[in-house]
Amino acid sequence: MKITSAEFVISNQDVKRCPNSGIPEYAFIGRSNVGKSSLINMLTNKKSLAKTSGRPGKTQLINHFLINKSWHLVDLPGYGYARVSKTSKAKFQKFITKYFEQRKQLISGFVLVDVRHEPQPIDVEFMEWLGESGIPFSIIFTKADKLKPNALERNVEAYKKYLTEGSWEEMPPYFVTSSSNNQGKEELLEYIGGINDS
Ligand code: GDP
């Protein structure tokens, strides 16, 4: 799939106010600074469709974008940012979980993780919650350009091993990406296009 148009639709904190059309959607989520905005901009060929985070965790909004006039790309708030107070953390986690539980239009979530890091409890717990809730998702490894090929492969294998020795029988679908050199872009867009066609 080629992305030929990407338009901002609406931002809000209330799942009930998300677009109520039946347009299928795909939601991107991850820890602040994981590279989510850069990835969304890479996928959509835009410099600043999603705002790259100078101040991570600042805006906690559900952002809907209409892609190719046929599907919604949803940019969810970054989680786990230390400077967010406990109260607001609890609140925003609630609206994130509500989003996943209530959006019938959601085809799949994409959980972004920085390929340089070992599995982090917050990401793994979030994936477990998605799994238990029956919400389909894939993993997107980001910033692949920051590692040499051997180290990259080693880290991906270690992540797989960690998950499959934990609660997953099988590794969820995953993508290795870099917004610096477009690695994984075609593959990810083909995947989204493929689920849209089926
Ligand atoms: P967000 O908070 O998840 O939206 O993260 P951003 O997209 O704002 O990226 C956080 C930082 O990581 C920025 O300084 C980006 O330039 C950098 N970054 C994001 N993706 C990549 C990548 O694929 N490769 C490299 N080298 N840096 C990246």
Image: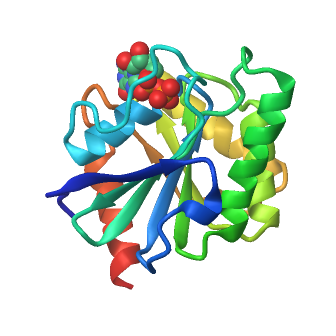
> Residue at 25% of width from left, 36% of height from top?
182
Please state the horizontal and vertical placement of residue 102, each as a whole percent of the image: 69, 69
> Residue at 71% of width from left, 43% of height from top?
161
Rendered view: 124 above or below 53: below
- The quadrant of the rendered image in which ligand 1 is seen is top left
Answer left or right for 131 relative to 186.
Answer: right
Q: Quadrant of residue 3?
A: bottom left
**Where is the N terminus found, in terms of image quarters?**
bottom left
Residue that lies at the very extreme toward the bottom in this rendered image: 198
Colour scheme of the picture: rainbow
Rendered view: 65 above or below 117: below
Please state the horizontal and vertical placement of residue 99, each as a whole percent of the image: 66, 59
Q: In which quarter of the image is residue 159?
A: top right
> Is residue 7 shown to the viewer in this render?
yes
> Residue at 24% of width from left, 53% of height from top?
6
Answer left or right for 84 relative to 51.
Answer: right
Rendered view: 157 above or below 53: below
Answer left or right for 133 relative to 170.
Answer: right
Please state the horizontal and vertical placement of residue 186, each as a whole percent of the image: 26, 52
Residue that lies at the very extreme toward the left in this rendered image: 4
Rendered view: 137 above or below 89: below
> Residue at 60% of width from left, 60% of height from top?
137
Please name whichever residue, 170 or 38, is drawn nearer the observer in this view of the structure.
38
